[in-house]
Image (cartoon, grey):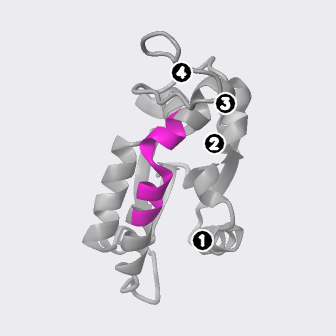
Amino acid sequence: MAGEGGASEGEVMHLSTPPTVGSTVENTGEAYASSVGTEKREQIRAEAVGRSRNVPGVLGGPNRAVRNQCSPAKKRFAKWLRKHPTAAEQALWQCLKARQLGPGFRRQSVLFGWIADFYCPRCKLVVEVDGLSHIGRERDDAKRDAILLRHGYRTLRIPAVDVYRNLPAVVRRIAKAIDG
């Protein structure tokens, strides 16, 4: 066993704090994601999705209540996601919060029955960080993106590995999407 607080070779180190922006995937990203508990995240997501099927057939419009209509379980799940972000989401949030790119962003917001990783109401831009939880869900993601687009919301999908490897380029890509 390694020294206090360390991990021996081959052992996954669980982090109690999110990584810094300059961190690499090998020493933070996957370890932090596993410490959050991918199984727990998927369990809560499945519960929230199962209880939110009562969203009206015509979604959207200017009515905020309809746009954000969802089950209490989905609202709890969004809150849980805000409290337990993945390493990629945490690193990106440090660059998006407090209007650093101009318009304000919200994180883990319910939008037309789905939870958006990051959402800019002024630009109608949804930023999704596609990590482990999106593997095998490409068809669902495409359906969601199409519905959001019908309501005027653009979706920018960013692989989590890009956030880990080149955060400044990801931020430039988001800034470009905001401008046009």
In front: label 1 or label 3: 3
Circle 2 packing at 10 Å, graded few (<14), some (14-19), many (20+), is some
Residue 137 in the image: above or below residue 19:
below
Seen at 44% across and 31% down, the residue is: 97
Q: Are marks 1 and 2 in contact (CB under 8 Å)?
A: no
Numbered mark located on residue 133 in the image: none
The mark found on residue 164 in the picture is 3
The stretch in magenta equals: 32-43
Instruction: Give x and y (percent) for residue 57.
Output: 46, 90
Task: Compare marks 1 and 2 and give the one earlier in the sequence.
Answer: 1
Q: CA distance from mark 3 to mark 4?
A: 21 Å
- Report crowding for label 1: few under 14, some 14 to 19, many 20 or more residues within 10 A (C-alpha): some
Q: How far apart are labels 1 and 3 at the CA level?
A: 25 Å
| Mark 1 → mark 4, Cα distance in angstroms | 40 Å
Secondary structure character of the magenta stretch overall: helix
N-terminal of the pair, mark 3 or mark 2, is 3
Residue type highlighted by circle 4 = Ala
* Secondary structure beneath label 4: loop
| In this view, the mark in front (1 or 4) | 4
Secondary structure of residue under mark 1: helix
Q: Which mark is residue 178?
A: 2
Q: Amino acid at mark 2?
A: Ile
Q: Nearer the viewer, mark 4 or mark 2?
A: 4
Name the residue beneath numbered marker 1: 144
Closer to the N terminus: mark 1 or mark 4?
A: 4
The amino acid type, in three-letter code, at marker 1 is Arg
